[in-house]
Image (cartoon, rainbow, N blue to C red):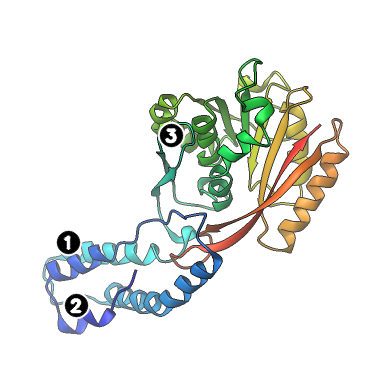
């Protein structure tokens, strides 16, 4: 957003309530939805070009929050201005600093009309990272059509004559990837996460159910804790090895995740030669790369060894850092089979 702070009504000018409110409304920043085809140089250039403007706008908003606004007599109007300025500032503090947001994620559809998925993200509190839509989910979701044509052609191609393909997403978070798979692949997808994450996941599924079903897909949700006793998990998962395809996005963030993820895949992937698990991992730092290598090693030694049949790289964007602009994230994704 290109703005000149010099044109804003300044606190020292004692502008009227309506003028300040109009300015604050115009400074609203919509949550970013990233174009996965944007070149890295464009991302970097946009970030640097807007850096000075971001600092100036933040300073302007802070000046309103600090001011007593003594020339405005109505205390309720003061509260409105402070509230608006605080919201505009939080919108510029990265995803972790925002409150609840809703984003509309666009998709092109090779075999049908284009569509949007509407995703609610509650405020991120503590370690509830499943309440954020991660950039790697959108990157992989944008590739689902191609994956169906190539990596999963034996299950999703026009020549497939078997029973309906059941798809499971592990660690669905806000549900973007799993719902996109249901819509684009015209199949049944079960989206899962920890019990605390499922209520928002279910909300998003219900919000998008009409769109998904109109495109030929179906979706359901359930609680599923990896490596747990099954207590608190949905009854849907009492039977093991039900799913021909398993999707996982950005699930390696702790030292115990590689082992837990390997066990979860082994528990739920169908005992069929053509069953596949597709994993995408953002390579943010050396820790993430190490966790990916550990997962590959653990998965290869599991009770039903999983081999990486193909691997690829994608570049996307994310907004976990500071500032309202997205930053580049390089992602690895692979297809595993037994």
Per the model, the C-alpha gap separating discs 3 and 2 is 41 Å
Disc 2 designates what residue?
Answer: 9
Crowd around label 2: few <14 · some 14–19 · many ≥20 (10 Å): some
Residue 99 visible: yes
Crowd around label 3: few <14 · some 14–19 · many ≥20 (10 Å): some
Position of the C terminus by quadrant: top right
Residue found 74% across the figure and 57% down from its top: 289
Q: Is residue 185 left or right of residue 276?
A: left
Identify the secondary structure beneath mark 3. helix
Q: Residue 67: which disc?
A: none
Q: Residue 203: which disc?
A: 3
Disc 1 designates what residue?
Answer: 76
Foreground tag (2 vs 1): 2
Position of the N terminus by quadrant: bottom left
x then y, percent, for residue 105: 43, 45
Residue found 52% across the figure and 30% down from its top: 182
| Along the viewing direction, whichever of 273 and 52 lies nearer the viewer | 273
x then y, percent, for residue 287: 73, 60
Per the model, the C-alpha gap separating discs 3 and 1 is 34 Å
Q: Is residue 180 left or right of residue 154?
A: left
| Along the viewing direction, whichever of 73 and 160 lies nearer the viewer | 160
Image: 132 above or below 98:
above
Among the two numbered marks 3 and 2 on one chain, the one whose residue lies closer to the N terminus: 2
| Along the viewing direction, whichever of 35 and 48 lies nearer the viewer | 35
Instruction: For the residues labelled 3 and 2, say whether their Cβ atoms are less than 8 Å apart.
Output: no
Image: 68 above or below 154:
below
Residue found 44% across the figure and 31% down from its top: 112
């Amino acid at each position: 957003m290109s703005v000149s702070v010099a044109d804003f009504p300044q606190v020292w000018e004692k502008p009227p309530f309506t003028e300040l409110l109009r300015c604050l409304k115009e400074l609203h920043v919509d949550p970013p939805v990233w174009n996965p085809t944007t070149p890295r140089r464009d991302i970097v250039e946009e970030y640097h070009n807007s850096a000075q403007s971001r600092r100036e706008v933040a300073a302007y908003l802070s000046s309103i929050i600090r001011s007593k606004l003594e020339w405005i007599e109505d205390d309720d109007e003061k509260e409105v201005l402070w509230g608006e300025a605080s919201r505009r500032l939080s919108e510029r503090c990265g995803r972790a600093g925002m409150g609840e947001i809703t984003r509309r994620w666009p998709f092109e559809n090779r075999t049908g009309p284009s569509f949007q998925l509407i995703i609610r993200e509650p405020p991120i509190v503590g370690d509830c990272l499943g309440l954020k839509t991660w950039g790697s989910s959108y990157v992989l979701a944008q590739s689902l059509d191609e994956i169906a044509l190539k990596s999963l052609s034996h299950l999703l191609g026009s020549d497939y004559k078997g029973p309906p393909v059941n798809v499971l997403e592990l660690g669905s978070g806000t549900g973007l990837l799993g719902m996109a798979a249901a819509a684009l692949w015209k199949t049944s997808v079960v989206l899962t996460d920890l019990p605390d994450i499922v209520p928002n996941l279910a909300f998003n599924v219900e919000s998008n159910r009409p769109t998904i079903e109109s495109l030929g897909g179906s979706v359901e949700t359930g609680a599923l804790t990896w490596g747990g006793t099954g207590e608190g998990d949905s009854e849907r998962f009492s039977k093991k090895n039900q799913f021909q395809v398993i999707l996982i996005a950005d699930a390696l963030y702790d030292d115990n995740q590689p082992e837990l993820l390997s066990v979860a895949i082994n528990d739920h992937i169908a005992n069929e030669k053509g069953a596949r698990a597709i994993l995408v991992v953002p390579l943010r730092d050396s820790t993430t790369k190490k966790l990916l290598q550990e997962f590959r090693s653990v998965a290869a030694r599991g009770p039903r060894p999983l081999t990486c049949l193909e691997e690829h790289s994608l570049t996307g964007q994310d907004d976990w850092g500071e500032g309202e602009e997205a930053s580049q994230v390089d992602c690895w994704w692979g297809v595993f089979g037994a």
